[in-house]
Image (cartoon, rainbow, N blue to C red):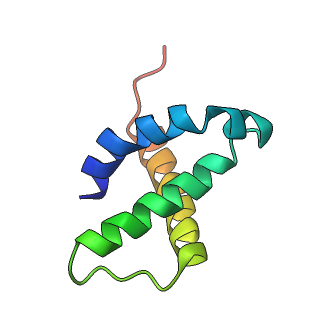
Amino acid sequence: MLGLINAFLRPILVILTLPVNILTLGLFTLIINGALVMLAAAIVPGFVIGGFWQAVLFAIVLSLVNIGISFMGGENKK
């Protein structure tokens, strides 16, 4: 569900909040990711997030895991 939300809603939200993202040097994207995690928690039964800042922390950890996976399984560099 989080993948679908990120695929459809995240690009729209990033474009709509582009001026704020520029002012905060991209850190506002973490707030957007936290809000999307909270939306996923509201839709999926059994997936519970305690609060907004826990959702932002979850989004940060998820981003770091994605970076690690892409680094480990990335293209062969020549």
Point 43% across, 80% down: residue: 49
Coordinates of residue 55 in the picture (x, y in percent)? 51, 71
Q: Is residue 77 above or below residue 8?
A: above
Going by the picture, which residue comes out furthest to the top? 78
Q: What is the tally of numbered marks visible in this picture?
A: 0
Front residue of 62/50: it is 50
Up/down of 45 relative to 62, above or below: below
User: Looking at the image, which is closer to me, 23 or 76?
Assistant: 23
The reply, left or right, for residue 39 in relation to residue 54 is left
* Quadrant holding the N terminus: bottom left
Image quadrant where residue 18 sits: top right
What residue appears at the point 68 percent right and 39 percent down from the top-left corner?
A: 21
Q: Residue furthest front?
A: 16
Residue under the image location 41 percent in, 32 percent down: 74
27 displayed left or right of 56: right
**Residue 11 in the image, given as x and y percentages of width and height:** 43, 35
Residue at 22% x, 73% y: name it.
Answer: 44
Residue 38 spot, x, y in % from top left? 42, 69
